[in-house]
Amino acid sequence: MNRLFLSLFCVFLTLILIFSCSVEPKSIDYNLDQCAACKMMISEQQFGAELVTKKGKIYKYDAIECMVSSFTKSDSPDFAHVLVTDYENPGNFIDAKASTYLVDASRPSPMGKNVSAYKSPELLSKEFNSIDSKILNWDQLLDYLNEN
């Protein structure tokens, strides 16, 4: 009986260790989770972002600009996932480094930098070509937010 109990206990501990070390992103619980940078409640589904370290620690953000601030202050290779919410599909994460960004006052973000993310750049180039709009890739966004 003791051997069976010990074997089951070892299997149980192994499973806990395997699943507790996950580096998978977790969805944002809107109106419950707080931004890791500014501590505001995350409530707008078009603007959430998330960093997941290679060790599985998850940082959730209410705006892309909050996430970028944390990203640039840290050792960026430490992240397994750098994610932003697709503005066109609220609540759904996309790879931040492969996304296209819009800076436009007609789409104000929670922290006031007016940054939103998109999976497809084609939609933006047709809709936003005013002198006040900026369409940026990841590297350009990092430069833009570090300057402003």
Image (cartoon, rainbow, N blue to C red):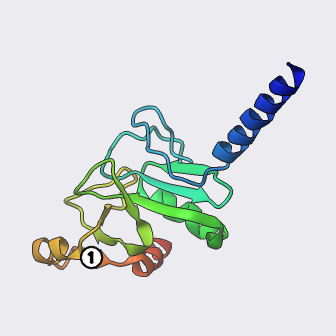
Name the residue rendered at 63%, 72% in the picture: 77
Q: Position of residue 21 (x, y in %)?
A: 67, 49
Residue 70 placement: quadrant: bottom right
Q: Residues within 10 Å of mark 1 (few under 14, many from 20)?
A: some
Seen in the picture, residue 146 relative to 20 is either above or below; the reply is below
In-image side of 85 versus 5 (left or right)? left
Query: Residue at the left extreme?
Result: 126
Can the viewer see residue 37?
A: no
Can the viewer see residue 53?
A: yes
Seen in the picture, residue 131 relative to 31 is either above or below; the reply is below
Residue 73 placement: quadrant: bottom right
Name the residue rendered at 42%, 41% in the picture: 42
Residue 145 placement: quadrant: bottom left
Which secondary structure lies at badge 1?
strand
In-image side of 123 versus 6 (left or right)? left
Query: Residue at the right extreme?
Result: 2
Which image quarter holds the C terminus? bottom left
Which one is nearer the viewer's eye here, 52 or 103? 52
In-image side of 123 versus 112 (left or right)? left
Q: Position of residue 137 (x, y in %)?
A: 36, 78
Q: Amino acid at mark 1?
A: Lys
Which one is nearer the viewer's eye here, 11 or 148? 11
Q: Position of residue 78 (x, y in %)?
A: 66, 67
Name the residue rendered at 45%, 37% in the picture: 41
- The total number of labels drawn is 1
In-image side of 115 versus 33 (left or right)? left
Q: Position of residue 133 (x, y in %)?
A: 22, 73
Name the residue rendered at 35%, 53% in the picture: 47
Which image quarter holds the N terminus? top right
**Residue under numbered circle 1:** 134
